[in-house]
Image (cartoon, rainbow, N blue to C red):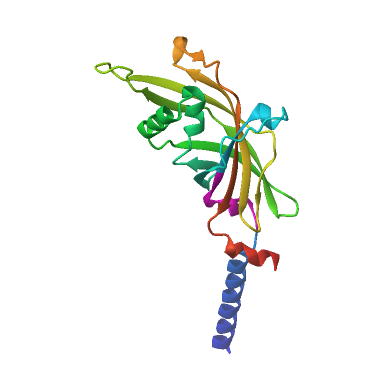
Amino acid sequence: MQLFALMLVAGCSLCFTACSDDDDVKDPNEIDTSVMYGDYKGKMISCNIAAHEGNGENGEAEPGVDVSATIENNTMRFEKFPIKDIVLSIIKDEDLANKIVEAVGDVNYNVEYVPTLTAAKDSIMINLNPEPLMLTVTMPAENEGEEAQSLVVEVQVEAGEKNAGYAVEDGNLKFNIDVTKVMLGEGEDQQEFTGFVPTSLHFDMNQHRVSHYFRTFE
């Protein structure tokens, strides 16, 4: 009888432990803002802000350029941020702009954001906090024998006025950032480039792998 009682007590203890462990397991269908972490590909379209606000002109510079990003820890990371439109707005010469973009190489640019999951848990609203984009542009020498000149360019960026958001079901991410000003040089010698036209950059990207979230809506 004593042996039977000991076995009964031990069995109950194992049962309670197992139940406690089950309580700590997170529901795989639970949706939070980390659902948007991952890799993205899509398009970026550049638009003249004044034309976009309705002055009667078509502000789109081109149908769109390919762009990719990785989102993690409340940061959007661009390893190859497209800068041609920005350079072209300063240089005004496409052939020269292409040479400068090639010389600059891949541009890393990070955009911090604050996510807010909607009450329905079907989308995430995003509050962007972009920092200035810093570039070092090497201007080719105009004449043979002259040295190329390097110029520091500070591109001032703000969050776009339109709502930025992520759709949980299909993994689509849309947001805008506005390039409001371009500063040339650095320190006390820094000057604003007066010929720059403020531009809005529209991003429309899709998450690579979101199929494992679809079961939430079944």
Residue at 40%, 25% (x, y): give it: 136
Answer yes or no: is residue 74 visible: no
Position of residue 127 measured from the top left corner of the image (x, y, whole percent): 65, 38
Residue at 55%, 15% (x, y): give it: 194
Q: Quadrant of the C terminus?
A: bottom right
Q: Residue furthest right?
A: 119
Q: Residue 96 or 133: which is nearer the viewer? A: 96
Q: Quadrant of the N terminus?
A: bottom right
Q: On the image, which quarter does residue 53 sit in?
A: top right
Residue at 63%, 32% (x, y): give it: 59
Q: Residue 16 or 133: which is nearer the viewer? A: 133
In the picture, measured across the screen, residue 183 lies left or right of residue 180, that is left
What's the magenta region? 31-43
In the picture, measured across the screen, residue 176 lies left or right of residue 90, that is right
Establish if 32 lies above or below 193: below
Establish if 47 lies above or below 207: above
In the picture, measured across the screen, residue 103 lies left or right of residue 127, that is left
Residue 32 belongs to magenta span: yes
Residue 208 belongs to magenta span: no
